[in-house]
Image (spheres, rainbow, N blue to C red):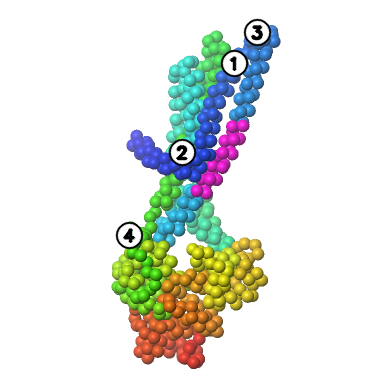
């Protein structure tokens, strides 16, 4: 009893999701939903007309036979037959119309839900991407959310339609015996129990299996993606990843088939009970007909009512099961849509400064990535003077890129504050703050779009002109890349779409630099901007960059001394703190970490060209 109560309580817990799903469908396809509802009501009533006409037609045929085939009785029979055919035709037409309406409704709902998922995916914090739980939420929302709301509404519609039919059929049965509808309902209850029980079991399995499903998709991506194709082949990883994919899929397949087998056996047992109830009712009615208490028309009517009633009952139970199942899975969608970012604008944001007059302050900042056990920055303090080019150098994992992410407010520090013109970043509107910053990350995105579109994405707010795009390309040195392309700025980049042209890593980086330069923001943030350039290209780019950065504040994270030495100030980061700061000459003469790395590089290369060392190094 306690188990049944628990399952009933679990079913009642899904009711809020029903109303939210209906509201979601209503918002995305209002007119189509009204049309669909009207069709449901008519389709629910039509079986009543079919059953009524069946009895009248059979009794009329009996009368024709008894009268010897007179025209009057025959004409009445033909009229009933035409009406029966008309009802069947209307039922067919309504079924076709309902299918079209449902398909249109489903497409609109799917697009609307996908839009909601996309909006939420863009709005959530970067911290969510550091959590496996977030990817589980996203996977379930993406997998279930696109079709479950429409499927739920269709199940509710089927429930309503079959409910109308059942009520009408019960009205036909009650005159024969009040207990008949309840007996048939009792025979169907085991099927309902089986359906609800296995829906809950399948739901719980899907929750447990989410990580394995994502892992299978990951191995699938490793085996098919261009980004990893070369390494998979060179290291002979294909067979390994195929085996791992098959292993995960075999486990999922075995568990899913076991559930399907168990459900099939349980449904078979429940179906047998339903057939017994149907057979008992028919034997009872046949005995009444043999004893003269019912006509052949009554017998035909009873058969039609019981047969259609049982069919409606099965459909009703299936609809209840589907409503329950869809409600369970819709919980994933609404849980995902309820995720709230913590990186948000304050209720009353301070106005963002138009110009950066007093520099950037990192004041005693401590930050640890979500789920991490080590602080990326610890009691970190740094002042970057307005209008300067500041280079940040240090070994891998020292926290260099982290401070760029904090400056763009992709994350908030756990302790300390970051200030622009004396104002904490958390007091500014997030969108206005990010419009003040233009960024090139260490691994820039390679958009499969034209060159002009790739660069233009750097500032979509004012729709850059062709001249502005070309100027940004020239500033980044990407104009030389464009000059070698057959269609110039109209060349489609990337290999995902037909006619696309791929670029080298260094060429892609120049296009990304042009995208960053296009935005006329007072702060320029560059993460390893010259990592894919040779020494000649680097020298040329540095000359252009100094010109471009005039009047703006630039922060460059780099491993290359040949890039860092051109900065107005250099800051060495070690273990999440600033170890030393100064110009290139000051740091070399101070004998600290920077000087040691610089001298090691000089010894390694064996040459210094006019005070500039070519090649990468890590301080």
Q: Quadrant of residue 421?
A: bottom left
In which quadrant of the rendered image does the C terminus lie? bottom left
Comparing 141 with 298, the one in front is 141
Q: Which residues are magenta?
A: 93-112
C-alpha distance separating marks 1 and 3: 15 Å
Q: Residue at x 47, y 24 (%)?
A: 167
In which quadrant of the rendered image does the N terminus lie? top left
Residue 385 percent across, percent down from the top left: 36, 78
Q: Residue at x 62, y 13 (%)?
A: 60
Residue 137 percent across, percent down from the top left: 43, 53
- What residue is disc 3 on? 66
Q: Earlier in the sequence, mark 4 or mark 1?
A: 1
Residue 422 percent across, percent down from the top left: 31, 71
Q: Earlier in the sequence, mark 4 or mark 3?
A: 3
Is 204 magenta? The answer is no
- What residue is disc 1 on? 56
Magenta segment, prevailing SS (helix, strand or loop): helix
Q: Earlier in the sequence, mark 2 or mark 4?
A: 2
Q: Is residue 249 at least partly visible in the picture?
A: yes
Q: Which dot, 4 or 1, sits closer to the camera?
A: 4
Is residue 2 positioned above or below 361 on the image? Answer: above
- What residue is disc 4 on? 348
Disc assigned to residue 445: none
Disc assigned to residue 323: 2
C-alpha distance separating marks 4 and 3: 90 Å
């Amino acid at each position: 009893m306690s188990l049944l109560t628990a399952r009933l309580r679990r079913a009642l817990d899904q009711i809020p999701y029903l109303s939210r799903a209906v509201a979601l469908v209503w918002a995305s396809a209002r007119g189509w939903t009204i049309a669909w509802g009207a069709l449901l009501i008519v389709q629910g009533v039509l079986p009543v007309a079919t059953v009524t006409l069946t009895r009248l037609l059979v009794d009329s045929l009996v009368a024709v036979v008894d009268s010897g085939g007179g025209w009057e009785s025959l004409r009445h029979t033909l009229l009933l037959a035409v009406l029966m055919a008309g009802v069947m035709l209307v039922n067919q037409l309504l079924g076709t119309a309902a299918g079209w309406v449902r398909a249109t409704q489903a497409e609109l709902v799917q697009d609307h839900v996908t839009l909601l998922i996309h909006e939420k995916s863009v709005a959530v914090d970067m911290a969510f991407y550091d959590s496996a739980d977030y990817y589980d939420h996203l996977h379930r929302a993406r997998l279930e959310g696109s079709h479950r709301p429409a499927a739920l509404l269709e199940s509710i519609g089927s429930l309503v339609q079959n409910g109308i039919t059942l009520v009408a059929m019960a009205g036909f049965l009650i005159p024969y015996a009040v207990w008949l509808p309840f007996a048939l309902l009792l025979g169907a209850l085991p099927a309902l129990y089986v359906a609800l029980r296995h829906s809950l079991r399948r739901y719980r399995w899907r929750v447990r299996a989410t990580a394995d499903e994502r892992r299978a998709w990951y191995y699938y991506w490793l085996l098919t993606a261009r980004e990893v194709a070369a390494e998979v082949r060179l290291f002979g990883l294909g067979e390994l990843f195929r085996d791992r994919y098959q292993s995960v899929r075999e486990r999922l397949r075995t568990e899913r088939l076991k559930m399907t087998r168990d459900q099939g056996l349980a449904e078979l047992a429940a179906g047998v009970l339903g057939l017994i109830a149907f057979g008992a009712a028919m034997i009872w009615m046949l005995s009444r007909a043999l004893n003269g208490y019912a006509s052949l028309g009554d017998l035909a009517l009873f058969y039609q009512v019981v047969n259609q009633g049982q069919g409606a009952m099965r459909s009703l139970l299936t609809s209840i099961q589907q409503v329950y199942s869809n409600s369970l899975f819709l919980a994933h969608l609404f849980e995902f849509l309820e995720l709230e970012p913590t990186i948000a604008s304050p209720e009353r944001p301070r106005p963002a400064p138009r110009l950066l007059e007093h520099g950037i302050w990192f004041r005693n900042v401590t930050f640890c990535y979500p789920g991490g056990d080590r602080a990326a920055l610890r009691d970190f303090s740094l002042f970057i003077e307005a209008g300067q080019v500041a280079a940040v150098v240090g070994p891998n994992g020292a926290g260099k890129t982290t401070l760029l992410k904090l400056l763009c407010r992709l994350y908030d520090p756990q302790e300390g504050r970051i200030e622009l013109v004396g104002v904490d970043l958390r007091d500014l509107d997030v969108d206005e703050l990010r419009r003040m910053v233009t960024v090139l990350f260490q691994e820039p995105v390679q958009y499969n779009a034209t060159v002009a579109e790739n660069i233009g994405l750097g500032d979509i707010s004012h729709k850059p002109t062709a001249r502005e795009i070309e100027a940004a390309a020239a500033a980044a040195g990407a104009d030389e890349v464009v000059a070698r392309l057959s269609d110039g700025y109209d060349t489609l980049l990337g290999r995902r779409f037909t006619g696309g042209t791929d670029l080298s890593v260094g060429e892609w980086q120049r296009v990304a630099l042009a995208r960053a330069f296009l935005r006329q923001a007072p702060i320029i943030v560059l993460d390893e901007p010259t990592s894919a350039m040779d020494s000649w290209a680097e020298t040329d780019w540095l000359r252009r960059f100094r010109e471009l950065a005039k009047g703006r504040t630039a922060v460059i994270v780099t491993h290359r001394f040949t890039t860092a030495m051109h900065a107005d100030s250099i800051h060495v980061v070690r273990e999440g703190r600033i170890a030393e700061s100064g110009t290139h000459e000051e740091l070399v003469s101070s004998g600290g970490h920077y000087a040691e790395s610089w001298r090691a590089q000089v010894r390694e290369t064996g040459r210094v060209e006019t005070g500039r060392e070519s090649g990468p190094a890590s301080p």
